[in-house]
């Protein structure tokens, strides 16, 4: 079968690899669509970050070359002898995280903290391929109204819902989202769906700002042209917001998140910050604010699927282009590492030629 394999930094290749078959507790999924995530691009430009290159992954025994892709949907085409809950023909989304279920953290129910956590597309073969093998408990059936394209958003929507849970967003809360890429636009919607009364969105790209407004942001701000902290203070009688989500993964966004939160506010770090950040902790201390990191998700896939099927989270406008796997390097990865990357939110890839 055809697949996109990561070999090293700036070295990904479309190759023919043997078609995998499922073990007793595993499911074989024929991939329909797989989204290109910023973290795939990070592995390409700055990797290896999560892909094992020297020692094999402790859970899967795998190391590079690895098939990339962790945001995918597909149809079940084969099940192992012990698989009970999933049948051939099911339309599914796949949770790419595979916990060990044995370590201290897994036994405490915190699977994302698993000391041997593997992720399809990083520590095992992922979704930029014609077929993927995944354990049964990673497979989630999609309801009829959720298309295969929208099914690829279960994973990033789970990220957004997890961030809202970590923030403990409550009905009536005032929130802000700094950075409106795919995750930011999903957080705008998830924070609304979980009860926030007001969501301010801060994003320099005009097209993304208008998308944020369309998807539920109350007011949007261009941080290059105005001081979002001061503007939000004016709109909230000086109170500013209860929760700010940093979704850009850059130091400037962290400082914006600090300036828009009010006394006792929470800053949720959702973006993957690739560089160290100088941060005035005194301002955090004086107003008793906290910073909380939110990484991935635990059991948020079922909630993500219900939000998508009830259109509480809308993803069609986030799909900027659909391409074929044959063209993923030129029309996908390279575009997302060029100046044209701002034109895209999610590029979806189909393995069908
Ligand atoms: Zn992702
Ligand atoms: Zn574990």
Image (cartoon, rainbow, N blue to C red):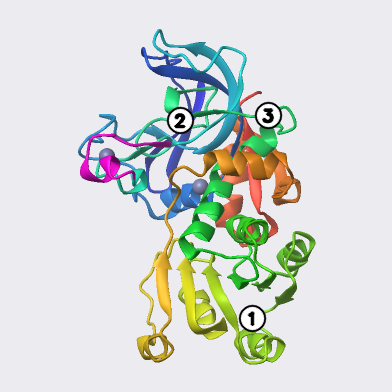
Residue 137 placed where, x, y %?
43, 27
**Vertical order, 53 against 177 (above or below):** above
Badge 1 local density, few (<14 within 10 Å), some, or many (20+)? some
Marked residue nearer the N-terminal end (3 or 1)? 3
Q: Please tell me whether residue 8 is drawn above or below residue 80 in the rendered image.
A: below
Mark toward the viewer: 3 or 2: 3
Q: Residue at x 42, y 35 (%)?
A: 120
Q: Alpha-carbon distance for marks 3 and 1?
A: 39 Å
- Residues tagged 1 and 2 counted as in contact (Cβ below 8 A): no
Q: Which residue is mark 2?
A: 138
Residue at screen point 48% across, 73% down:
267
Task: Where is residue 288? Give x, y as percent.
Answer: 41, 85
Give the labeled residue for mark 1: 223
Per the model, the C-alpha gap separating discs 1 and 2 is 39 Å
- The residue at 51%/44% (across/down) is 300
As helix, strand or loop, the secondary structure at mark 3 comes to loop
Q: Which disc, if any, is residue 213?
A: none
Residue 104 forms part of the magenta stretch:
yes
Magenta span of residues: 97-109
Q: Which residue is mark 3?
A: 143
Left or right of 252 on screen, residue 51 = left
Q: Viewer-proximal residue, 291 or 153?
A: 291
Name the residue located 46 percent from the left edge and 14 percent from the top edge.
Answer: 84
Q: Are marks 3 and 2 in contact (CB under 8 Å)?
A: no
């Amino acid at each position: 079968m055809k697949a996109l394999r990561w070999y090293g930094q700036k070295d990904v290749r479309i190759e023919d690899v043997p078609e995998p078959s499922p073990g007793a507790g595993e499911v074989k999924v024929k991939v329909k669509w797989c989204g290109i995530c910023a973290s795939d691009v990070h592995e390409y430009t700055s990797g290896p970050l999560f892909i094992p290159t020297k020692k094999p992954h402790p859970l899967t025994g795998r190391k590079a070359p690895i098939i990339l892709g962790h945001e995918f949907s597909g149809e079940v085409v084969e099940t192992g002898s012990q698989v009970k809950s999933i049948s051939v023909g099911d339309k599914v989304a796949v949770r790419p995280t595979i916990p060990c279920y044995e370590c201290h953290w897994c036994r405490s129910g915190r699977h994302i903290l698993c000391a041997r956590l593997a992720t399809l597309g990083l520590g095992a073969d992922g979704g930029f391929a014609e077929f993927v093998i995944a354990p049964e408990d990673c497979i989630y059936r999609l309801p009829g109204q959720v298309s295969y394209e929208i099914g690829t958003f279960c994973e990033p929507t789970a990220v957004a819902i997890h961030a809202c849970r970590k923030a403990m967003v409550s009905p009536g809360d005032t929130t802000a989202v700094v950075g409106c890429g795919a995750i930011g636009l999903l957080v705008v919607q998830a924070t609304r769906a979980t009860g926030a009364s007001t969501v301010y969105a801060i994003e320099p790209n005009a097209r993304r700002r208008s998308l944020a407004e369309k998807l539920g942001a109350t007011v949007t701000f261009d941080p290059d042209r105005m001081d979002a902290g001061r503007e939000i203070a004016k709109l909230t009688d000086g109170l500013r917001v209860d929760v700010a989500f940093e979704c850009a993964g850059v130091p400037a966004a962290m400082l914006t998140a600090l300036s828009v939160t009010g006394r006792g506010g929470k800053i949720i770090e959702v973006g993957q910050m690739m560089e160290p950040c100088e941060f005035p902790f005194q301002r955090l201390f004086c107003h008793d604010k906290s910073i909380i990191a939110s990484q991935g998700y635990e059991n948020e896939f079922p909630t993500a699927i219900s939000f998508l099927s009830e259109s509480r989270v809308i993803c069609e406008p986030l799909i900027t282009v659909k391409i074929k796997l044959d063209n993923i390097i030129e029309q996908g990865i390279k575009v997302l590492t060029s100046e044209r990357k701002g034109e895209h939110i999610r590029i979806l890839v189909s393995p069908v030629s």
